[in-house]
Image (cartoon, grey):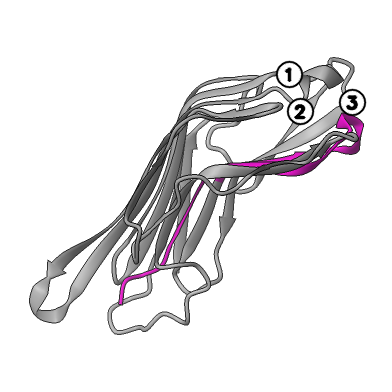
Amino acid sequence: MRITIAGRAGLVGVLLLAGLGAGVAPAAASNPAGVASLGSAAFTKGTSAPISIASLADCAVEGPTSNSSGVVTRTGITFGGGTTTCTTTVVDPENDVTTTKSEAKGQNFELSALVSSSGPRIKIRSYSVSCTATQTSTNASWTYGGATGLGTLPSPVPVGYVKPITKSNGTLLAEAIFNEQTLPGNGSIGLTMLRIKFAPASNITGEVVVGRTACSPTP
């Protein structure tokens, strides 16, 4: 089994998982057949009421196969809306062979919860995550543009790359984890573009997820 990861810093990341081989049956999938989401949030700042945004615009190849969300705003965070599609294409009708593609496209994400702790205002103008699958391979990718407050990322972005989010004096307020992957070893992929975990100095507990998808080889 071969895994290849490539990307341009802060812009594009790709994960290719192949090598199941003809006639080799995948193990029971730990990741879904095909899903996508714009993101979610669950955090509490000090003694304020908890902030909760359930997974936005979820789609799945089993249904719903498309979804959308308008702007969702809570104190300290905004998801600017977007769409998801989870499609199945029949490539060999006689043998019921299919491929799938699960994709989320979001826009105008903003996290302002760290500003009162002397941290940055994080903005992402646009982002997308995608997971495609055939009988013998799966491929996951992510991309974003127009980001501020996250600094410069390496190129390519490593798996699970952690970017510290700090005050100007270096105090850690949160960790931004890019290119987070779940690879159970059966050919399936789970990919989260960005997960922000708050540190104690921020006076916030919880996390934010931006862009999530997963898929498994088709039967």
- Per the rendering, the mark at residue 120 is 1
Name the residue beneath numbered marker 3: 171
Q: Residue 158 at what x, y percent from top left? A: 59, 43
Magenta-span inclusion, residue 206: yes
- Residue 194 visible (yes or no): no
Going by the image, does 94 lie left or right of 67? left
Q: Main secondary structure of the magenta part?
A: strand
Answer yes or no: do the residues labelled 3 and 1 have beta carbons within 8 Å?
no
Going by the image, does 139 lie left or right of 163? left
Magenta residues span: 193-219
Q: Quadrant of the N terminus?
A: bottom left
Q: Secondary structure at mark 3?
A: loop
Number of the front mark, 2 or 1? 1
> Callout 3, which amino acid?
Thr
- Residue 4 visible (yes or no): yes
Up/down of 84 relative to 97, above or below: above
Total marks placed: 3
- Pointer 2 local density, CA inside 10 Å: few below 14, some 14–19, many at least 20: many
Answer yes or no: do the residues labelled 2 and 1 have beta carbons within 8 Å?
yes
Quarter of the image holding residue 74? top right
Q: Work out how far the residue at label 2 is from the one at label 1, CA to CA, in angstroms.
A: 8 Å
